[in-house]
Structures are given as structure tokens and as C-alpha cells.
Image (cartoon, rainbow, N blue to C red):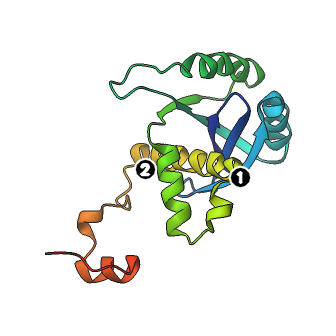
Amino acid sequence: MDRLIGIDYGRKRVGLAVSDPLGIFASALETVQTAKIIEYLRNYSEKENVSAFVVGMPQNMNGAPSEAAKDVKAFLVQLEKAFPGVPIHLEDERFTSVLAHRAMIDGGMKASDRRDKESVDKISAAIILQSYMDRTSGSNFAYDPALVPDTMTSKVSGRRRRK
């Protein structure tokens, strides 16, 4: 079955995520040292059929590429060279670290575990991949807080909404 790979590229570490075979859900996969990422992806693609890569592109709030975008562009050249027939899609990665921290808090992760940057990187990769899949599949299952009834929200968060 085909898999999409989500990538949150960084100078030291790369967070990776993978789709389920149907391309509906993204799951955090691994955090790999940047120097070993191509080797890791080659080994992974020998076991699983990778149909595309989704790489987070760092942008400033105005939509212009951020300083880190230069590093990502250099990585894209390596990725394209190592996997010439595999499509590469770019996805805006603004706020993914913030969303990753929020997901860890909401998931009940201890504060000491939330400081682990490797966890943040692979969860960020999952957010990047899920965002891409939601945007391109036309899925009606994207989370919209406005559609959650007040009673459900207060039970989930443990807080009451102010009226």
C-alpha cells in the first residue's frame, strides 16, 4: 500500500510522519538526525511504497519564506536526487510547533516529556502531513471547533464555556 511521508526538516533533527494506507490519517513516525535522513528514507522506502513526500516549508507571517527556508530548499534538492520519481509537495508549516505542544498537552503528556524536542518534531511532521491530506482530499472530517456542541466542548476540555 502507498504511504505519504510528512517531513519537518531542521538543521539538527528531522521529524517524520506517515499516512495510513488509505491516506486519511497521519501518525508520528520517527525523529532522525539530519545527516542521516536520506539514508533513513531509503531504508524505509525499501519496506513501504512511498507515493509522495510532504515537506513543511517555513514561512514568515507575511507568507514570505523564512530564514530556515534556505535549509529546506537545499534538502529538497537532495530529496529529489535520491528519489527522482517520487513527487514532493510543500506545505506551510507556520504554527506547527505550537500545535504540536497543544496536542501533547491535550493528550495528557507530562511537562517533562513535552520538553523533548524530538517528540515535537515528529508531531509537527504529523500536523504538516495531516494538513496536506485534509486540504487535498476534500475530506469533510477536518476539525472545526465551531461545529462542536457546547456540551461536548466543556466535557472534553473540563472547562465550562462562558456565555
The residue wearing badge 2 is: 134
Q: Amino acid at mark 2?
A: Asp
**Residue 11 in the figure: left or right of residue 145:** right
Q: 16 or 18: nearer the eye?
A: 16
Categorize mark 1 by other alpha carbons within 10 Å: few (<14), some (14-19), many (20+). Answer: some
Of callouts 2 and 1, which one flags the residue occurring earlier in the amino acid sequence?
1
Instruction: Give the labeled residue for mark 1.
Output: 29
Report how many numbered discs are placed on residues in the image.
2
Place residue 74 in its image quadrant: top right
Camera sees residue 65: yes
Foreground: disc 2 or disc 1 = 1
Depth check, front residue: 109 or 25: 109
Q: CA distance from mark 2 to mark 1?
A: 19 Å
Task: Identify whether 68 is placed above or below 130.
Answer: above
Q: Residues within 10 Å of mark 2 (few under 14, many from 20)?
A: some
The residue at the point 48 percent across, 21 percent down is: 66
- Residue 58 on image: x %, y %: 50, 28
Q: Is residue 17 visible?
A: no
**Residue at 48% across / 34% down in the picture?**
91
Q: Position of residue 159 (x, y in %)?
A: 33, 79
Residue appearing at x 52%, y 18% in the figure: 67
